Amino acid sequence: MNLVKKQSFRIDRFTFEDGKSIPVELGYETYGNLNEDKSNVILVNHYFSGSSHAAGKYNPDETASGYWDGLIGPGKAVNTDKYFVISTDNIANVQAKNPKVITTGPRTINPETGRKYGSDFPAFTYRDVVKIQHEFLTKQLGIEKLYAVMGASAGGFMSFYWAILYPEMVERMVGVITNPQNPVHTSFNVCQHAMRVLELDPKWQGGNYEDGNEPEESLRLAVQMMNVGAYTPEFFEETYKRDSTETGTYKDITIKTAYENQLYEAIKVGSALVDASHWYYTSRAVMMHDITYGDQSFEDALNKISAKVLLVSSTSDILQPTIYNRQTIDIMNTQGKDAELFEIESKKGHMAGIFDTHLFSDKISGFLKD
């Protein structure tokens, strides 16, 4: 059994792209051992609602392991007998109420005022998170080279930025269920809509709500939007069963159907550790993901990448459609890059990149060995 512990690092003053400078503290986990010349480092970035808990367990009694435990560990695709794996929590991690998550965000106390940042928190981007990671790795750990950087969904966004902002550091990049630009459809469907739902809640208070009077119901709806978008129609038909014998729902529009109740209860449990303002800020960061920002064109941004690239896409993914992966790889191959797309099929849609690692673990294993 691979037991891990949560650690944290602090940067006394970090200046975000919006110009605000604040102290930052984030959690991180490591797996495996750093070799003498620090050449075996793999950085793993987490997805929207994930955390740095990518593999292993905190104690032997836990039933669940880290989300990518199928990939990361001794003898696995990301072999911790060989590689030293680092994973960090993100800024404004949505699991702000999780005691195993260490993050700086809107619900953090501003040392200058003694009150929570609330809506005064910096409008962070995933480029900001990557720059924070870079400072941590280079200045605090003395790591100057990444054997690979990888991540799923928003973790893939960050992996793209690593390969573009620090091409001299990154040898290999793996992006799973991700894209170099967040699709506009996804920005509307599960991000902006969620933000608007939160804004319409009287308890939202411009993001400056008090503990104990939080916008719980609107948050649950925001989480449900993401959940519904992350899986396929087939998955929902099989998971949330309809009851064709129920009669009350045909007589009273306020009575929920069986499948509505099932999903509501699942979301209620799943959102217990989530904070509304952190969800709001992270949704905006996803919307603002675009590697073209700061460059002349999309092609110019991709051309900065010198790393060997592997993209893994689920063909049933609604949030990060495969078509954009294909276009990206075509451009990079035209530029003479070493870039490849590996497509998988799964009823889990977007979440196949988290829960169906068996479909692409061999591919990643071979990619890392090449």
Image: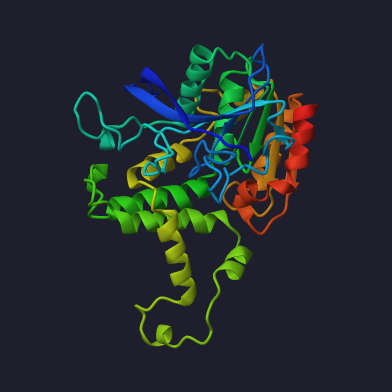
Residue 117 location (% of width, % of height): 26, 33
Residue located 49% across and 39% down the image = 51
Quick check: can you spot residue 278? Answer: yes
Q: Nearer the viewer, residue 204 or 99?
A: 99
Residue 167 higher or lower than 190, as above or below: above
- In the image: residue 162, left or right of residue 123: right
Residue located 47% across and 85% down the image = 246
Q: Nearer the viewer, residue 289 or 360?
A: 360
Residue 156 location (% of width, % of height): 59, 36
Assign the N terminus to one quadrant of the image. Answer: top right
Question: How is the protein colored in the picture?
Answer: rainbow
Q: Nearer the viewer, residue 324 or 232?
A: 232
Residue located 31% across and 32% down the image = 121
> For residue 264, what is the image quadrant?
bottom left
- In the image: residue 47, left or right of residue 170: left
- In the image: residue 57, left or right of residue 210: right
Assign the C terminus to one quadrant of the image. Answer: top right
Residue 302 location (% of width, % of height): 64, 26
Residue located 32% across and 22% down the image = 22
Quick check: can you spot residue 181? Answer: no
